[in-house]
C-alpha cells in the first residue's frame, strides 16, 4: 500500500516562521509549517519552538500562556519550559523541541527529516471501499473521525472518490440514500461519535425502508474510555442495531479489509444499511505488513432469479385469461423497466406505477397511466377499477400504494419476504422482474390474443388533461395553484433530469400533475421523511450530475429542515434547480386537521424570503407570485450553472 502522502510531510531543514518583531514578548502562538504544528514562544527575548501537542492529552500549547517563565497548556495547566520544552522538577514528559535561529530577515526553525509515510488501517479500509465502487462520501469531518478522514482525503487526492462536506449529518445519509436509490450503487456517509452519528439515523432508515444500499462510517471515542461515560460516548452498535443489517465495531486486531468487504457486500446484496464504527485510535494505527485491501472480486454473483416453470405457466395462464389486465411497476422494477414495458406492449396492457415508481414508464408512452393511489392520476385509478387482473412487478403493496387488494393479483418480486407481505395475493411469483417479464413475454408470444387498450389510455389522458387545463386558471388571490406549477415544470424540465421530491402537498401535487417523459424520480417512499428532497438532489448530483440535470421539489416546511445545505451546493458548484412551493404552513397537515374536524393548530410557518436567502448563500434566487412569471423563472433557474432556487408563492387550498 502506498498512502502517497510523502509530498505532505515537512521538508528537512530551516523554515522561516516569523518576521522579526511579529511575536510580542511573553507570548506564544501556533505556527504551522507544512503539516507540522508548532508552539512558537518568545520569553525574555528568547524564541522557542515546541511541538504543539501537549504530551498529556494533546492540548494545543500554542494557545496557552506564559506565566512565571512556564508555558502553560490551556487544557489542564501542565507547564513546560517555553524554549526547551522541559517540565518542572518531578515531571518527566516533555514536548519535542526544535532548534530556532534569529536571522536578519526573521525567525527560523529547523525541522527534522520527513518520516517515511506509513499506511494506516484507514488507508486499507478506504482502498477497499474504493474497490467496492464507493465513489462518493458525504459527511462531516470532526474530532473522532480525523484519522479516517485523512485516508479519505488521500483517496480523493488520488482521484479515487469525492468527498462532500455537508452542514448536517442528516443530509449526508439522505444524500447517500438517494445515490443508492438512483444508481443501485454504494455511497457512504461519515460522522463523528455521539451526535454526528445519531444525526445519521433518519436518512439511514430512509435507505433501509426503500431498499437502497448505504454505508455509514462512524467515528468512536477511544477504546480506552469507551463505555465509561466519556465525552460523546454513545453505544453506536446498540443505537443502530435495528437500522443496520451489518453492524460492527472495528478493533485494533480486526481484519480491517475483511470487515469492509462484508459491510459493502451486505449493503449491496441486501440493499440495506451497513455500519462500521471506527474507534479513534484504531483509525491511525499502522496497517500490518500483511494487510491487503479487499474488494468484490470473487465475492459477488450476478444473480437473476427466473421463476420456477410451474409458476410461470400459472402466471401466463392467468394473464392470457384476463380481459383487462393492468401491469403495475413498483420501485423494485427500477432497473428492469424495459422488459416489463416490452411485455405490456406485447399485451397492449396499460401500465400504472406506484408513487415511488413514478416515471418508470413515461406518461407519454401510449400505455402509461401515471401513478396509482392518493398521489395518483384518475387514469391509473380508472384502469385499476376496471381491471380483472393486476400483475405487479417490484411493488411492495403498502397501505399508500393504491393497489386494490380485492383484485386478483399476480405479484412478481425477487424477495420472498416482499411477496404477499401486506396481504395475501393470488399468485406470488419469486423471480427478478426483468427475467420474469421476459419469460412471461416468451410464454405469451404465440398462444394468447390480447385486446389492446391504447385508445382507451389515450381517451383517459384526454379527459384528465382537459381537467388539469381547467384548473390552471384557479386563483383565489392567495398564490399560485399546483396544477399551474407542475404544468410549467412538465413542459420545461429536461426529459433526462433526475427529480427529488419531498413530502406533503407538494409531493401529492407532483404525483398527480407532473407528466414524466424520461425523468427519474426520487423520494423518501416508505419512511416519508420531510426534508428529503434537497439533500437527495445533492446525492443525485454526486452520482450523475455531470450527465443529467438535477431538480428538486419541496414545500417550505421540507426545505426549512436542511436549508443550510444550499451553501453546500454552492460550495461544490452543484447544478441543482430547486422548486420551493411556499404556502407558509405545513399545508398537508392543516388539511388533515380540517378533514379530521380538528382545529388547525401550529402548522403555520414563519419563513424568510427564500429567494433572497438563496442569493445570500451564493445561489441564484427567484421569487414567483404570479403565474405569468412561472415559465421564465423556471427556465432561468434551469439555465443557471449552479444551484438555483425558485420560490413559488402557493395557495394551500389549490393543490
Ligand atoms: Fe495539556 Fe492536559 S492536554 S495539560
Image (cartoon, grey):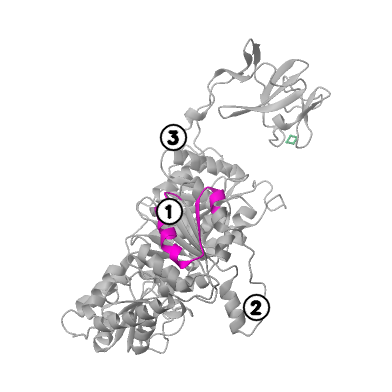
Q: Is residue 476 left or right of residue 196?
A: left
Tell me where residue 502 appears, x and y as whole percent: 50, 66
Q: Residues within 10 Å of mark 3 (few under 14, many from 20)?
A: few
Which span is picked out in magenta? 614-642
Tell me where residue 99 appears, x and y as whole percent: 65, 16
**Precedes in sequence: disc 3 or disc 2:** 3
State whether residue 5 appears in this view. Answer: yes
**Precedes in sequence: disc 1 or disc 2:** 1
Which quadrant of the rendered structure holds the N terminus? top left
Identify residue for label 2.
600
Tell me where residue 306 appears, x and y as whole percent: 29, 72
Task: Please report contact status of discs 1 and 2: CB closer than 8 Å, yes or no.
Answer: no
| Residue plotted at (18% across, 79% down) | 445
Identify residue for label 3.
2
**Does the magenta segment cover residue 52?**
no
Residue 465: assigned label: none
Front tag of 3 and 1: 1
Identify residue for label 1.
541
Q: Residues under labels 3 and 2: Cα distance?
A: 62 Å
Front-most of residues 335 and 426: 335
**Does the magenta segment cover residue 635?**
yes
Disc 3 is placed on an element classified as loop
Question: Looking at the image, is 159 positioned above or below residue 199?
Answer: above
State whether residue 242 appears in this view. Answer: no
Front tag of 3 and 2: 2
Amino acid at each position: 500500500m502506498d498512502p502517497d502522502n510523502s509530498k505532505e510531510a515537512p521538508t528537512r531543514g530551516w523554515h522561516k516562521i516569523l518576521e522579526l518583531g511579529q511575536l510580542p514578548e511573553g507570548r506564544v502562538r501556533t505556527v504551522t509549517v507544512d503539516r507540522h504544528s508548532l508552539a512558537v514562544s518568545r520569553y525574555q527575548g528568547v524564541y522557542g519552538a515546541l511541538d504543539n501537542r501537549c504530551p498529556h492529552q494533546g492540548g494545543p500549547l500554542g494557545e496557552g500562556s506564559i506565566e512565571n517563565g512556564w508555558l502553560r497548556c490551556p487544557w489542564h495547566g501542565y507547564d513546560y519550559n517555553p524554549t526547551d520544552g522541559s517540565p518542572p522538577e518531578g515531571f518527566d514528559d516533555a514536548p519535542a523541541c526544535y532548534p530556532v535561529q534569529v536571522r536578519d530577515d526573521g525567525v527560523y526553525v529547523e525541522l527534522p527529516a520527513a518520516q517515511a509515510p506509513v499506511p494506516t488501517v484507514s488507508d486499507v479500509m478506504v482502498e477497499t471501499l474504493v474497490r467496492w465502487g464507493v465513489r462518493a462520501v458525504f459527511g462531516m469531518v470532526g474530532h473522532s473521525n480525523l484519522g479516517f478522514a485523512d485516508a479519505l482525503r488521500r483517496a480523493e487526492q488520488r482521484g479515487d472518490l469525492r468527498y462532500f462536506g455537508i452542514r448536517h449529518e442528516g443530509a449526508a445519509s439522505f444524500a447517500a440514500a438517494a445515490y443508492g436509490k438512483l444508481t443501485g450503487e454504494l455511497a457512504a456517509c461519515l460522522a463523528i461519535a455521539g451526535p454526528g452519528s445519531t444525526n445519521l439515523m433518519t436518512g439511514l432508515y430512509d435507505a433501509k425502508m426503500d431498499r437502497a444500499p448505504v454505508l455509514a462510517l462512524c467515528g468512536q471515542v477511544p477504546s480506552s474510555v469507551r463505555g465509561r461515560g466519556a465525552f460523546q460516548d454513545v453505544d453506536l452498535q446498540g443505537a443502530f442495531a435495528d437500522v443496520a443489517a451489518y453492524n460492527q465495531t472495528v478493533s485494533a486486531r480486526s481484519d480491517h479489509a475483511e470487515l469492509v468487504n462484508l459491510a459493502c457486500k451486505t449493503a449491496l446484496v441486501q440493499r440495506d444499511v451497513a455500519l462500521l464504527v471506527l474507534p479513534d485510535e484504531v483509525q491511525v494505527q499502522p496497517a500490518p505488513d500483511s494487510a491487503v485491501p479487499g474488494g468484490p472480486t470473487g465475492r459477488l454473483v450476478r444473480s437473476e432469479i427466473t421463476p420456477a416453470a410451474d409458476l410461470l405457466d400459472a402466471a401466463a395462464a392467468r394473464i392470457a385469461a384476463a380481459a383487462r389486465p393492468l401491469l403495475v411497476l413498483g420501485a423494485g422494477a427500477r432497473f428492469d423497466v424495459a422488459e416489463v414495458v416490452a411485455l405490456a406492449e406485447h399485451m397492449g396492457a396499460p401500465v400504472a406505477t406506484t408513487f415511488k415508481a413514478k416515471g418508470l414508464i413515461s406518461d407519454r408512452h401510449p400505455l402509461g397511466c401515471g401513478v396509482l393511489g392518493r398521489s395518483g392520476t384518475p387514469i391509473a385509478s380508472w384502469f385499476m377499477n376496471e381491471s380483472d387482473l393486476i400483475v405487479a412487478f417490484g411493488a411492495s403493496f403498502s397501505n399508500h400504494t393504491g393497489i386494490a387488494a380485492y383484485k386478483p393479483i399476480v405479484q412478481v418480486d425477487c424477495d420472498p419476504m416482499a411477496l404477499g407481505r401486506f396481504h395475501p395475493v393470488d399468485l406470488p411469483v419469486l423471480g427478478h422482474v426483468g427475467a420474469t417479464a421476459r419469460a412471461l413475454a416468451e410464454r405469451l408470444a404465440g398462444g394468447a390474443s390480447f385486446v389492446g387498450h391504447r385508445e382507451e389510455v389515450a381517451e383517459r389522458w384526454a379527459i384528465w388533461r382537459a381537467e388539469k387545463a381547467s384548473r390552471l386558471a384557479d386563483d383565489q388571490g392567495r398564490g399560485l395553484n399546483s396544477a399551474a406549477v407542475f404544468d410549467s415544470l412538465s413542459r420545461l424540465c429536461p426529459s433526462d433530469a433526475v427529480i427529488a421530491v419531498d413530502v406533503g402537498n407538494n409531493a401529492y401535487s407532483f404525483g398527480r400533475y407532473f407528466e414524466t417523459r424520461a425523468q427519474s424520480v426520487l423520494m423518501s417512499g416508505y419512511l416519508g421523511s420531510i426534508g428529503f428532497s434537497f439533500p437527495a438532489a445533492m446525492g443525485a448530483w454526486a452520482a450523475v450530475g455531470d450527465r443529467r440535470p438535477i431538480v428538486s421539489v419541496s414545500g417550505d416546511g421540507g426545505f426549512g429542515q436542511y436549508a443550510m445545505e444550499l451553501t453546500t451546493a454552492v460550495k461544490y458548484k452543484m447544478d441543482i434547480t430547486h422548486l420551493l412551493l411556499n404556502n407558509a404552513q405545513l399545508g398537508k397537515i392543516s388539511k388533515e386537521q380540517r378533514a379530521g374536524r380538528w382545529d388547525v393548530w401550529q402548522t403555520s410557518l414563519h419563513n424568510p424570503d427564500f429567494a433572497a436567502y438563496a442569493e445570500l448563500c451564493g445561489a441564484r434566487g427567484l421569487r414567483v407570485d404570479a403565474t405569468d412569471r412561472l415559465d421564465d423563472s423556471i427556465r432561468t433557474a434551469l439555465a443557471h450553472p449552479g444551484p438555483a432556487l425558485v420560490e413559488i408563492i402557493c395557495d394551500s387550498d389549490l393543490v
